[in-house]
Image: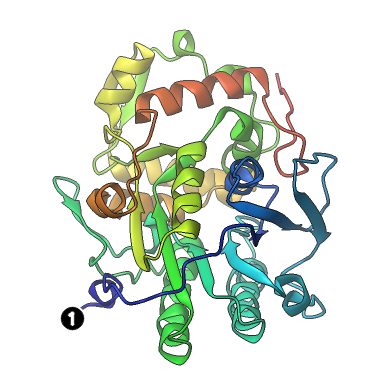
């Protein structure tokens, strides 16, 4: 039995009580901002506690904020989680990619502090943001379910950290069987308001957003193996909300149709796909990353080429979740956001138009 298949079991679990308090870490980020909004509008939720490094001016109904840095050992997470019906752990740092020890402190050690505080505060439900990046290399010609091994791609810090936390949760579940643990494994997440943040994270602070215009792309690089899945962040947040209220535990794949490759992007942008050898593409990315011109590392590029396509049947049949937007609609919205420097009223999502 693989690690993943063990996560599909259905065991009795405590259902979150109506009117309960829900705590969200990383509450001002891409997914967190969408989830906080949904929970604030949810009559079954009594209150929302948003944890973030910087408290925003944004004030949704029923929501209170706490300034918490998960990388700090001084953070009193037990107090923050006290009385919560569920903790949704979304906080994640993508940078600095040149300092993997720094992201390890926030993402891995910070997450373990969250898990330990959930147990100490006797929170009945933990919903953890895993990722397609946790999966071991897999096929591009068929979709895999949640039983696919989650050993990541060891050379990429993002995948290595996501996979490590899957193992940490394996141990956590054995030690705390009374806590319902849900692991969400979404595809790449986009929305209009995240466009400026994701441009900064992956393309660099000074990459002009207006370059994301179809008329400026006479051709589109077609790299062997570059076929991925995408999902609107609001659709992912809806799955998280459903998981909070459910009795289910285990892992859930989340993605929209269709899967995205050069052919799909070419049709969307009106650009002609042009075959580009994998080594040439990687060399260009590695050179730009080595010169600190590009934040996204060549190691992450290697991982993306190896990620499997995900079968999301379990989320649809058991969570009764269905994305409202296709992957093409998601990417069209995101590109429009890049062109306009779109953002939101939180520090991570701050909009900025460059160029």
Q: Going by the picture, which residue comes out furthest to the bottom? A: 175
Specify the quadrant that holds the N terminus.
Answer: bottom left
Total numbered circles = 1
Q: Looking at the image, which is closer to me, 79 or 149?
A: 79
Residue 53 is situated, as x and y percent measured from the top left of the image, at 79, 58
Q: Quadrant of residue 91?
A: bottom right
Q: Is residue 69 visible?
A: yes
Picture colour scheme: rainbow
Q: Looking at the image, which is closer to me, 277 or 345?
A: 345
Q: Looking at the image, which is closer to me, 218 or 307?
A: 307
Specify the quadrant that holds the C terminus.
Answer: top right
Q: Quadrant of residue 57?
A: top right
* Label 1 residue SS: loop
The answer to whether 140 is drawn above or below residue 173 in the figure is: above
Q: Going by the picture, which residue comes out furthest to the top? A: 215
Task: Please tell me which residue is depicted at 27% across the width and 49% down the height of the picture.
Answer: 312
- Within 10 Å of disc 1 (Cα), the crowding (few <14, some 14-19, many 20+) is few
Task: Please tell me which residue is depicted at 39% across the width and 47% down the height of the picture.
Answer: 187
Q: Is residue 295 visible?
A: no
The answer to whether 90 is drawn above or below residue 102 in the figure is: above
Task: Please tell me which residue is depicted at 46% across the width and 8% down the height of the picture.
Answer: 215
Q: Going by the picture, which residue comes out furthest to the left? A: 141
Residue 128 is situated, as x and y percent measured from the top left of the image, at 50, 65
> Is 330 on the left or on the right of 45, as rendered?
left
Residue 289 is situated, as x and y percent measured from the top left of the image, at 56, 48
Q: Looking at the image, which is closer to me, 228 or 44?
A: 44
Q: Quadrant of residue 7?
A: bottom left
Residue 317 is situated, as x and y percent measured from the top left of the image, at 25, 50
Residue identified by numbered label 1: 1
> Is 136 on the left or on the right of 196, as rendered?
left
The answer to whether 175 is drawn above or below residue 128 in the figure is: below
């Amino acid at each position: 039995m693989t690690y993943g298949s063990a996560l599909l079991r259905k065991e009795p679990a405590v259902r979150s009580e109506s009117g309960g308090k829900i705590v969200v870490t990383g509450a001002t980020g891409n997914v967190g901002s969408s989830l906080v909004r949904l929970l604030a509008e949810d009559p079954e939720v009594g209150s929302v506690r948003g944890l973030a490094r910087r408290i925003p001016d944004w004030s949704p109904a029923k929501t209170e904020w706490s300034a918490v840095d998960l990388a700090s050992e001084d953070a009193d997470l037990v107090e923050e989680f006290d009385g919560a019906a569920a903790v949704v752990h979304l906080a994640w740092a993508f940078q600095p990619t040149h300092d993997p020890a720094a992201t390890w402190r926030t993402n891995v050690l910070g997450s373990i502090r969250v898990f330990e505080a959930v147990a100490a505060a006797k929170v009945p439900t933990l919903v953890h943001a895993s990722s397609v990046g946790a999966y071991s290399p897999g096929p591009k010609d068929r979709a895999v379910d949640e039983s696919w091994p989650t050993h990541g791609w060891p050379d990429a810090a993002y995948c290595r950290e996501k996979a490590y936390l899957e193992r940490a949760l394996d141990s956590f579940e054995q030690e705390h069987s009374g806590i319902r643990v849900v692991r969400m494994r979404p595809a790449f997440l986009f929305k209009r308001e995240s466009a400026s943040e994701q441009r900064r994270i992956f393309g660099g602070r000074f990459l002009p957003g207006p370059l994301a215009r179809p008329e400026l792309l006479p051709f589109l690089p077609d790299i062997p193996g570059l076929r991925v899945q995408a999902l609107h962040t609001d659709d992912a947040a809806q799955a998280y909300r459903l998981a909070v209220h459910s009795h289910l535990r285990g892992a859930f794949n989340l993605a929209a149709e269709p899967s995205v490759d050069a052919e799909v992007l070419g049709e969307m942008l009106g650009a002609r796909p042009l075959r580009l050898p994998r080594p040439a593409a990687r060399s260009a990315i590695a050179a730009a990353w080595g010169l600190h011109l590009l934040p996204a590392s060549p190691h992450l590029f290697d991982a993306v080429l190896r990620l499997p396509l995900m079968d999301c049947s379990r989320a649809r049949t058991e969570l009764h979740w269905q994305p409202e937007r296709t992957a093409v609609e998601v990417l069209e919205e995101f590109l429009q956001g890049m062109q306009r420097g779109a953002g939101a009223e939180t520090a991570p999502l701050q909009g900025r138009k460059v160029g």
